Image (cartoon, rainbow, N blue to C red):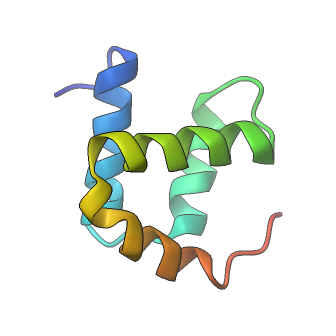
Amino acid sequence: PGNTDALGYGYGICQKVTGGESYATVMADVKSDIAPNDEFAASYLVSNAVNLLCPEQIWQLRNSASTYRPQ
């Protein structure tokens, strides 16, 4: 799916996580795409996308987030 709608965007997040991108990278990408682009909004979007659309990747996201420090 493309990133032209919310569902497509969520699947794009899943593709990044599945592809091994770090939580920090995914968060930076999301913050550059959304408004408001704060930590809470980005984290909410990333965690909900993974929980709903690719729950099998939750472990990978959590492992990557363990060393994450907000900018």
Question: Is 22 or 65 nearer to us in this picture?
Answer: 65
Q: Can you give x and y, in whole percent of width and height, for residue 14 in the image? A: 31, 50
The C terminus, quarter of image = bottom right
Q: Can you give x and y, in whole percent of width and height, for residue 52 in the image? A: 35, 40
> Height in image: 61 above or below 49?
below
> Height in image: 27 above or below 37?
below
> Height in image: 26 above or below 42?
below
Q: Residue 1 vs residue 45: left or right?
A: left
Residue 10, quarter of the rendered image: top left
Q: Can you give x and y, in whole percent of width and height, for residue 40 in the image? A: 77, 43
Q: Residue at x 60, y 54 (%)?
A: 27
> Height in image: 63 above or below 22?
below
Q: Residue at x 59, y 74 (%)?
A: 65
Q: Residue at x 78, y 48 (%)?
A: 39
Q: Residue 66 vs residue 22: left or right?
A: right
Residue 2, quarter of the rendered image: top left
The N terminus, quarter of image = top left
Q: Residue at x 72, y 23 (%)?
A: 35
- Mark count: 0
Q: Residue 71 vs residue 21: left or right?
A: right
Q: Can you give x and y, in whole percent of width and height, for residue 8 in the image? A: 28, 26
Question: Is 20 or 63 nearer to us in this picture?
Answer: 63
Query: Which residue in the rendered view is the most extreme toward the top?
Result: 5
Residue 69, quarter of the rendered image: bottom right
